[in-house]
């Protein structure tokens, strides 16, 4: 079906508060928690997204006769913090020539290296054409605002299709995902692993039990007030210990528990009745997403128990098909997570930089393919599933 693009009006909003939540969520066309209006608007409401942190919210909407037909979660960025698609070298190249790389335009979910739709158009017959129009509109906005570039990070397959044949530069990387093969229990999952891997996991879990730590899983509407405080205290302390800024406020976590109660999953780890560690997840109908971890004391094996094994067990018990525990971490392979691609696209307006970056991305891609082959030589499964 042809889309009459001349009848569409493009608006850059000043924030998600200007967009009706139900209308936005309908365009996501899934229950992806990180694209929910409650998540994105909550970041603004509770001080996690601020210009002084380098994030200026400007979601894009395409309208016809006042009706929102398509949208994109856009931000003006004054830095590259909280993105997980690293373009520091590109910014340095601009700076060496006395040019400004920042601000740039970014379609992403702040602080969340999680793949999902960035070009939101629902399930209508016009959805693909609307996504293409969003791409063209983002390009026009980039030029109109005299920005160096625009970026779509951690895109879905439908986004990739809309970008086919365009001037946007593709980039990919690997993350480690667990896939549910219909296991009936955690022990059933262990049975699919090679004996050494199975033994190592059993030993790690036994260490946690021997230390007197017990883990319990709660959803957002099952959390007590003191649980939220402990969660945020441990999240903040862990970020600060590693020299990172803890951008998410306690009020934001509580907001998610109130507005997305059954999509919030928290593992509380107690020792002698006191919370000593937490792991924070979000979930959809089909997937679990690991996000944050914090601990008051070092307990051997507890990080793996809280962040991986409790998540796998939750997926098996609730019938979720996929577990994405977060970015990076080759150690995840030994625990049943295998490398899968994540994709981003980049529109660099200056052709000199665009050509140079395209060459660099081709070299990077070749190295990443070799890297995956090396990773898969450590496949933990008995049947060497790929």
Image (cartoon, grey):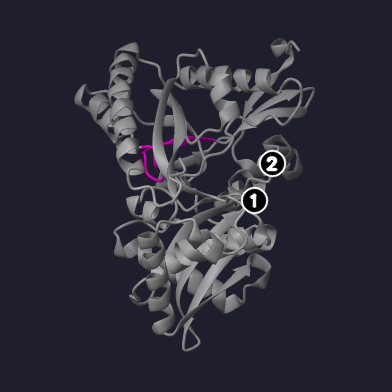
Q: Position of 139 compared to 134: left or right?
A: left
Instruction: Tell me the tag on residue 30.
Output: 2
Q: Position of residue 93 (x, y in %)?
A: 24, 26
Q: Position of 299 compared to 181: left or right?
A: left
Instruction: Tell me the tag on residue 284.
Output: 1
Q: Position of 253 compared to 203: left or right?
A: right
Relative vertical location of residue 219 with respect to residue 17 in this rendering, above or below: below
Q: Report the span colored magenta.
A: 74-85
**In which quadrant of the rendered image does the C terminus lie?**
top left
Task: Give the overall secondary structure of the magenta segment.
Answer: loop
User: Badges 1 and 2: C-beta atoms under 8 Å apart?
Assistant: yes
Relative vertical location of residue 48 with respect to residue 88 in this rendering, above or below: below
Query: Dot 2, crowdedness within 10 Å: few (<14), some or many (≥20)?
Result: some
212 drawn magenta? no
Residue at point 54% right, 25% down?
160
Residue at point 36% right, 31% down?
102
Q: Specify the quadrant of the image occupied by residue 157.
A: top right
Q: Position of residue 181 (x, y in %)?
A: 58, 50
Residue 147 visible in the snapshot: no
Q: Is disc 2 placed on a helix, strand or loop?
A: loop
84 drawn magenta? yes
Which is nearer the eye, 107 or 339?
A: 339
Q: CA distance from mark 1 to mark 2?
A: 8 Å
Q: Position of 105 compared to 245: left or right?
A: right
**In which quadrant of the rendered image does the N terminus lie?**
top right
Residue at point 62% right, 73% down?
223
- Which residue occupies the extreme left position in the image? 96
């Amino acid at each position: 079906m042809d889309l009459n693009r001349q009848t569409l009006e493009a608006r850059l909003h000043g924030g998600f508060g200007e967009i009706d939540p139900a209308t936005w969520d309908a365009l996501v066309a899934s229950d992806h928690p990180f694209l929910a209006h409650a998540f994105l608007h909550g970041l603004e409401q509770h001080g996690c997204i601020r210009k002084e942190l380098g994030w200026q919210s400007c979601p894009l909407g395409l309208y016809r006769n006042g009706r929102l037909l398509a949208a994109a979660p856009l931000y003006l960025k004054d830095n590259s913090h909280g993105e997980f698609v690293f373009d520091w070298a590109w910014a340095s190249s601009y700076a060496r020539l006395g040019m400004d790389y920042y601000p740039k335009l970014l379609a992403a979910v702040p602080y969340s290296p999680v793949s999902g739709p960035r070009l939101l158009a629902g399930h209508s017959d016009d959805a693909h054409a609307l996504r293409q129009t969003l791409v063209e509109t983002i390009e026009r906005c980039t030029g109109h605002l005299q920005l160096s570039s625009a970026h779509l990070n951690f895109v879905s397959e439908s986004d990739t299709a809309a970008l086919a044949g365009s001037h946007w530069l593709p980039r990919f990387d690997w993350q480690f995902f667990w896939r549910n093969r219909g296991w009936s229990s955690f022990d059933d999952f262990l049975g699919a692993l090679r004996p050494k891997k199975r033994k190592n996991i059993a030993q790690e879990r036994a260490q946690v039990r021997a230390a007197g730590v017990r883990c319990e899983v709660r959803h957002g509407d099952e959390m007590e007030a003191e649980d939220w405080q402990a969660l945020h205290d441990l999240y903040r302390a862990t970020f600060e210990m590693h020299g990172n800024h803890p951008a998410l406020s306690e009020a934001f976590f509580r907001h998610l528990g109130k507005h997305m109660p059954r999509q919030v999953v928290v593992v509380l780890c107690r020792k002698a009745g006191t919370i000593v560690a937490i792991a924070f997840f979000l979930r959809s109908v089909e997937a679990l997403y690991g996000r944050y971890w914090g601990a008051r004391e070092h307990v051997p094996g507890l990080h793996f128990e809280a962040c991986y094994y409790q998540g796998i067990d939750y997926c098996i018990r609730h019938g979720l098909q996929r577990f994405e525990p977060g970015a990076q971490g080759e150690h995840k392979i030994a625990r049943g997570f295998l490398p899968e691609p994540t994709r981003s696209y980049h529109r660099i307006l200056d052709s000199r930089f665009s050509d140079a970056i395209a060459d660099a991305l081709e070299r990077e891609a070749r190295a990443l393919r070799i890297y995956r082959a090396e990773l898969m030589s450590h496949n933990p499964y008995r049947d060497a599933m790929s």
